[in-house]
Image: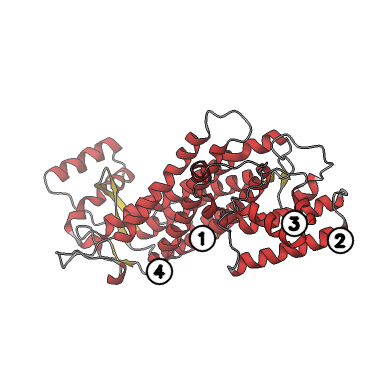
Amino acid sequence: MATLWNKGTSCTDAVECFTVGDDRVLDRKLAKYDVIGSKAHIRMLQSVGLLSSDELDVLLGALDRIYASIEDGSFVLEDDVEDIHSQVELLLTRELGDVGKKIHSGRSRNDQVLVDIKLFLKDELLQIRSEVLSLFEKLQSLSETYKDVLLPGYTHAQIAMPSSFGLWFGAYAESLVNDMYMLEGAYRVVNRNPLGSAAGYGNSFPLDREMTTSLLGFASPDYNSVAAQLSRGKSERCVASAIGSVALTLNKFAADCCLYMCPNFAFIKFPDNLTTGSSIMPHKKNPDVWEMVRGKCNRILAVENEISLLCSNMPHGYHRDYQLLKDILFPALDLMHACLGITSYMLDNIQVNGHILDAPIYSYLFTVEEVNRRVLEGVPFRDAYKQVGIEVNEGRFHYDGDLKHTHIGSIGNLCNDRIAELMKSASDWK
């Protein structure tokens, strides 16, 4: 197998297979970023005199052709080539000879991989931001549409107080604002340039790291070359934490939907083609989509812990363990995109029951309203509470009043406009 580190000896097939693992497949996600990072690197090399202008031009042209092949799907990682980074350099050397061999001056595969991963994670976070914003807008729209449709609120899985579909949809919209703060935090961590840190200790070439930082669109360099290598694992963990926050929001919403679709509740429903049936019970309409969202999001929530365990107990510097980060995080990012997409799709088809409270089972939903009504008439709270409790126990409780929930964040004052402003501010990063 062609490797960048080969010094004339070769690994046995067993060692090679064990250490490479799924890297060849996972690295396909990094291919275009390897080209982008290499183009910035050689522009910098030319600026400090390590490449001529002519050499830069032919290298840029060859890298552009490789990038085009990646975009059109014709790029191939050959069977005997270790990884994407080796393949790109091999293609350059085949086409340009000795000029192609100059591209790696001033960098190690350590900082090369780091910059590829950070560029990839930046794009992933921006895509997730867009998907979260789309879902947020859908939830806010549903909140406004159904703001006057009452819904029983529950605590301890017992009927508690009046809620509304406006409050329910709006709650998950606002929860996404907090998730957006987490996504921004992760983005700030990955938005720093490790290129030029080499294997963790820099090198003796007069590299212009500020130049590559600007060319690659990073906010700043990882200044300390050791700290740049310390960001391996920490960057992935921060991203895992951020998508875990989103996953927790989707997980709880999916759990609500599974419950609300149950005929015993019948709060919401979906068209038959978005549910599944039973092999023996013809009446079943199962919430398989929401169960899978719930389960997949649980898997995403586990990723942060798995990364933490993988990255602990290692001294600073690169260790091959870090290669396994891609095995953990990359599939989780795919799950995150899928869960956000299907949640949005399902909400396009949600049907709300507007007559839930017609059922007598919800007659006690208004006990707090009656207690508060009496308090407003001058009855001490504890006396009003006891009076209503006695009426409930004796089967005499009845409530005919109106709902007067007007404070910020209540069913009569959802503050969706203010929540939209929060999201606008929370998502203003790039």
Q: Nearer the viewer, residue 171 or 24?
A: 24
To which residue does mark 1 refer? Answer: 131
Q: Nearer the viewer, residue 60 or 291?
A: 60
Q: Earlier in the sequence, mark 3 or mark 4?
A: 3
At label 1, the amino acid type is Glu
Q: Tags 1 and 3 in contact by the CB under 8 Å rule?
A: no
Q: Position of residue 26 (x, y in %)?
A: 53, 53
Q: Position of residue 430 (x, y in %)?
A: 65, 54
Q: Earlier in the sequence, mark 2 or mark 3?
A: 3
Q: Position of residue 127 (x, y in %)?
A: 56, 59
To which residue does mark 3 refer? Answer: 39
Q: Earlier in the sequence, mark 1 or mark 2?
A: 2
Q: Nearer the viewer, residue 140 or 109?
A: 109
Helix, strand or loop at mark 1: helix
To which residue does mark 4 refer? Answer: 348
The residues tagged by marks 4 and 2 sit, at their Cα atoms, a distance apart of: 55 Å
The residues tagged by marks 3 and 4 sit, at their Cα atoms, a distance apart of: 43 Å
The residues tagged by marks 1 and 2 sit, at their Cα atoms, a distance apart of: 43 Å
At label 2, the amino acid type is Asp
Residue 385, quarter of the rendered image: top left
Q: Tags 1 and 2 in contact by the CB under 8 Å rule?
A: no
Q: Tags 2 and 3 in contact by the CB under 8 Å rule?
A: no
Q: Residues within 10 Å of mark 1 (few under 14, many from 20)?
A: some
- Name the residue furthest left: 394
At label 4, the amino acid type is Asp
Q: Mark number for residue 54?
A: 2
**Pair 2/3: label in front:** 2
Q: Earlier in the sequence, mark 1 or mark 4?
A: 1
At label 3, the amino acid type is Lys
